[in-house]
Image: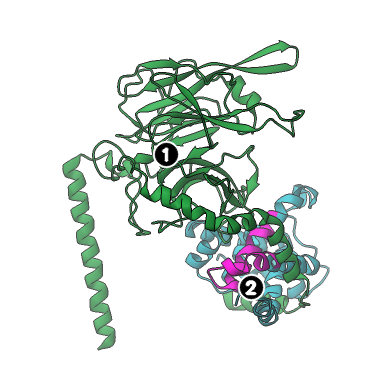
Amino acid sequence: MTDRSGFDAFVRARGPALARTAYLLTGDHHLAEDLVQAALVQAAKHWERIETSPEAYVRRTMYHQNISWWRRRKLSETPLESYDAPVPAADPTVRLTLEQALRRLTPRQRTVLVLRYFEDLTEVQTAAELGISSGAVKSMSRDALRRLRALAPELADLVGADA
Amino acid sequence: MSTDLREELTALAETQTFSPDPSAWDRGRRARRTSRVVRGAAAIAVVALVVGVGAIATGPDRQAPQPADVPGGALPSRIPPTEHDFLTDLAIGSASVAYVDQDATPVLVDAATGKAHRTLLPDFPTQQAFRVAGKSARRSWLALSPDGRRLAYPTVTVDEREPGQKTFITSWYRIVDLTTGESDLVEPPPGTGTPLAVSWTADGRIAVDVYGRPTSRTTRTNPPPTVGWTVDPATSDAGTSPFTGIVAPGGGVSAVIPDSADIVDAVQFETATGTDPVSELPADRYPEGAVVQPIGWVEHDVLVASIDPPQSDVVEHPRLVLIASPERPGSDVDYREFLPRLPPALSMSIAVDLVPDLTGDPDQQLTRDFAQEQPMGDSSGMVARVIMSGLLILLVGVAFIRMMVKRA
């Protein structure tokens, strides 16, 4: 697959799945679209040189790009003093609460959660994708779940008591 | 818990729609074309390079590098924190790595012990000189010879002739012999000023990049052209070089030292035929590119370079890599990282002869783990190896038995 038709076929086949992951990574529909497009542009740029599968390349680019974007815009994000405040329980549904709580995790924590619990990767596979140690994955995952419980106590059943 | 969370995440993700952007391919290819202009020139130059390749292939071989496990030295698998005391007796035999730390202090890594020593070098450029040089190329000032036994550096000082107008002054080059601890002064090439970079050639001369005669009005963004000189450290005889940068053994190709610490996605070369080919960095490892500093050649077609990707949560430190030169006539390596987690450095140099002969095996050991070896003597090291071998055999045996049980 070294031509446009191969790229288009890949985008048609895997685009929706990539977009779903992007949404969980960013917590924002528009940002998710931008993230997928940016990763696809990168893939098109290096299409002939992608030695692993194109999907693995695009996913890895998304993980790294999302963290990179967050670093650039973090100065304008939510002030830290309110960071750990519980999510207002305005909406009673679990899904909306989870959505709001996920947005308040750091990109690293969110990325680890997505890879572990959405992509079903093991700790070792997650570590390899992000280029960090398994121990770091484990502690980030634990911290992320703990923060989810702190942000949204009503999610305790969903995320476990002490996982 | 994880099943519930997975289900909720899946349901949440399903709210995202996807509309393919038909311009993604065109945008990617346009970006590729834009960033690959030099590549087009390189492709055209390949035919011309054949002549240069032939010259390199038939050129005299340089001194065979030492294997990583022979007495006499090796590159460390990790550069350790510096020892507490400054090294004042420079007769350490040989160094594997020489770098300038962020305080502008030169550091030598002993090739025999792997220990890193902050060092007092006579007339070494001051912290102020490095600060004035900023992030320009004009700070690759510490060069370790291929065999690790000699150091070369310019005796740069800073003069402020008028308020706010700082000027570099380089009256001499210093050559330090690490086998005796003695040092000599060498005259700079005639009519040249402070070098942009200093390195060693395979035949034992010092190679320096300096600004040449300006061809137009010079400004900060339009500096004079860079020219290369080589100097015999024994006689101070100097001659101009057809190349700038780090010249490969045989002289057919040179790795260009970038003008500044900018992020790039390819290593730039010059060849005897006047072409400027590039070797691209692996895009899947460095999707955003990296700062590249050529350091030396381990073979006539394999370059050692320092790669410093943009800092992120998943990339922590610069690292040393082997990169094939563009013509790559049967090179034993295409791209390989071999010394990760380099300390932050203003200038980095290694004894390239301490990289073993490359076999093409991606698992070939190129460095030595001194931290594992130092606490133990030879005999205890042997015992440890025997124990490790025994454990390995045990594990293989257990795995084999489990496999047979499963089959049964």
Q: Nearer the viewer, residue A26 or B263?
A: B263
Quote the CA–CA distance across marks 1 and 2.
Answer: 48 Å
The chain carrying label 2 is A
Q: Which chain is green?
A: B
Residue range of the region highlighted in magenta in the rendering:
A41-68
Q: Kindly indicate which chain is depicted in cyan in the rendered structure.
A: A
Q: Reply yes or no: does residue A150 show up in magenta.
A: no
Query: Quick one: B371 or B57, which is closer to the camera?
Result: B57
By secondary structure, the bulk of the magenta-drawn segment is best described as helix
Which quarter of the figure has residue A40? bottom right
- Location of the N terminus of chain B (image quadrant): bottom right
Q: Kindly identify which residue carries mark 1.
A: B79
Q: Residues within 10 Å of mark 1 (few under 14, many from 20)?
A: many
Residue toward you, B201 or B363: B201
Q: Looking at the image, is mark 1 or mark 2 nearer the viewer?
A: 1
**Local crowd at mark 2 within 10 Å, few (<14), some, or many (≥20)?**
few
Q: Chain of mark 1?
A: B
Q: Residue furthest bottom?
A: B408
Residue B271 position, x and y percent, is 53, 46
